[in-house]
Image (tube, rainbow, N blue to C red):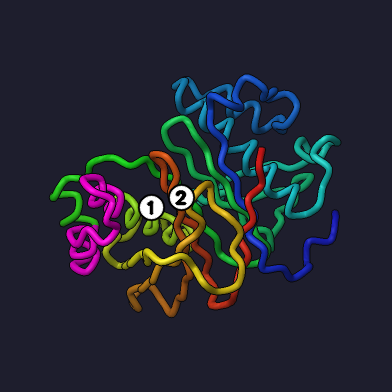
Amino acid sequence: MPDFNQKNRKILWTVIEEDKALSHLDPQHFLTKWERDYWSRLYVEKRSREWLLGRFAAKSVICSLLDFDTEKDCLERLCINRREDGSPVPLWDGDVLDNVCISISHRSGAAAAAASRGTGLGIDLESIEPRSNLFKEQFLTRREQELVSSNILDIGKESQSVMANLIWCAKESVLKALRLGLTVDTRKIECLPCTDLYTGPPLGNGPSLGWRSIEVNIDPRLGDRHARAWWTKWANRIACIAVLSKGNHQLLRLKL
């Protein structure tokens, strides 16, 4: 097995749109036998397409992170399986890559994936859509609801919808990094997006606006956990990435 123990705070991420990629993907080329068998049992067409996109995105960022040649047999030797808690886990020739973290998200004909070494990681992809008052009351903290109502983004009628979906996207990414998913009250994770461009160490570029930081507060009842998170927006989509670390990270986009 290759040496995966190098310390690196790089986070590699990508997003793939179905209409640009699906026709070029050959499952026989990049899925393991276990993955092909699993994929063949996905009878809902939308789920089948997005799962395929997600697996290709995830394998691509892992291979790039580890400097593997995807033109060789890397993709077929790399399997993305699931832990008991539902989170994705990468395996190389059947052995778990313990210090390689992977996160995958699907939404409305697109898939996003992020990979890093040795730290909890979550990525989420959302479309901008209306969110009801009931949704906000049930899933957002008081301060998050106030932020939605503030129109701080100053982009007209769409401002509140963008902020509501942005906060939800951020919560999902943090909960993925914690490997909790939606098993806990989402109000135990408070995400307060900043609207200024991130001014710390270089994060790389998002699809259009660059990455902005998110203040993350985790309920101490979930343990002494700390997370950092960032968001970006383009067209009708929002992406958030979260890591369980206080250190600096570099976000690099892999263009597929």
| Magenta-drawn segment | 140-164
What is the count of numbered marks? 2
Q: Looking at the figure, which quarter contains the C terminus?
A: top right
Looking at the picture, how far across and down is residue 91, in whole percent? Answer: 71, 48
**Residue named by callout 2:** 239
- The reply to whether callout 2 and callout 1 are in contact (CB within 8 Å) is yes
Q: Residue at x 23, y 41 (%)?
A: 130
Mark 2 vs mark 1: which is more N-terminal? 1
Say what amino acid the circle numbered 2 marks. Ala
- Above or below 10: residue 60: above
Magenta stretch holds residue 146: yes
**Is label 2 in a helix, a strand or a loop?**
strand
Looking at the picture, how far across and down is residue 78, in whole percent? Answer: 74, 42
Q: Dot 1: within a 10 Å radius of its alpha carbon, few (fewer than 14), some, or many (20 or more) residues? A: many
Q: Looking at the figure, which quarter contains the N terminus?
A: bottom right
Let me know if residue 85 appears in the view: no
Looking at the picture, how far across and down is residue 111, in whole percent? Answer: 52, 38
Tell me the quarter of the picture where residue 112 sits: top right
Is residue 202 left or right of 180 when viewed as pictured? right
Pick the residue in front: 205 or 7: 205
Q: CA distance from mark 2 to mark 1?
A: 7 Å
Pick the residue in front: 18 or 76: 18
Q: Residue at x 58, y 26 (%)?
A: 20
- Above or below 193: residue 75: above
Q: Residue at x 83, y 36 (%)?
A: 73
Q: Which mark is residue 169?
A: 1
**Is label 1 in a helix, a strand or a loop?**
helix
Q: Which mark is residue 10?
A: none
